[in-house]
Image (cartoon, rainbow, N blue to C red):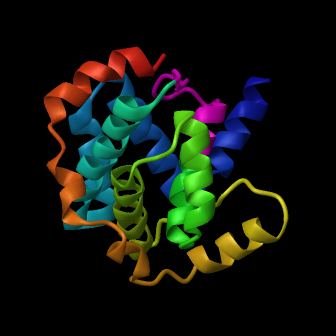
Amino acid sequence: MCDQDLSLFLSLFRGERLLVGAIRRLALGTGCPGAVAQFEFVCGWTGQEACRTLEVFLQQLALHGRRRLTVSRPGDPAVTRDERAMLDVFAFAQAEAYDAMDARLSDLLDAVPPASLGAAACIVAQVLAMNGCFVEAEVEGEIGAQCWAASTTPSSTAAQCAPAAATTWPCQMARENFSRLFT
């Protein structure tokens, strides 16, 4: 089982591994500086903004979510169902498949997603795409193929759906919500 989990984790694309590691560190509160350093290594000068926006994404999940999400510990090769759903959100954002992104966000929240959540996902996805870090959606059928084809040729449209207002979230209140959302 462990070998299978490890091969699954290693089969993730570079952008997916970066996101999973950062999501785990940020959601579990085990090292924001480590997540920022990874993003800066991969994305250069845009890495810090992308990592902080990922934190906003998680804060919005904590604020608006109606159910607890499961994330693994940093370094664990197993990817949880909720982590996979978050990866799908970023894949759909890169592919500009906003209806699919909203559907996946609704599943994560168990509620209608606010615009700020999708905006934060779009910013992170665009920065990753600009630095050659792509995320593949785990979706069967035509929409999955369309998302992958679109994500390999990113455009600037995704950045247009991510207003600067997404980064004005009061972080302290959202951090208080982390413990109630993530297990």
Q: Return the residue nearer the eye: 133 or 91.
A: 91
In front: 77, or 127?
A: 127
Q: Report the predominant secondary structure element of the magenta stretch.
A: loop
Q: Which residues are magenta?
A: 67-85
* Left or right position of 156 against 169: right
101 on left or right of 181: right
The residue lying at 42 percent from left, 38 percent from top is 23
Is residue 41 one of those drawn in magenta? no
Whole-percent x, y for residue 84 in the image = 62, 42
Q: Quadrant of the N terminus?
A: top right
**Which of the 4 image quarters holds residue 56?**
top left
- Residue for point 23% across, 48% down: 52
Residue 124 lies, in percent from the top left, at: 37, 59
Can I make out residue 59 in this image? yes
Residue extending farthest to the right is 141
Q: Is residue 40 left or right of residue 139?
A: left
Estimate the x, y position of residue 73 in percent, counting from the top left. Answer: 48, 22
Is 71 part of what is drawn in magenta? Answer: yes
The number of callouts visible is 0
Q: Is residue 2 above or below residue 157?
A: above
Image location (x, y in percent) of residue 173: 19, 26
Between 46 and 171, the one nearer to me in the picture: 171
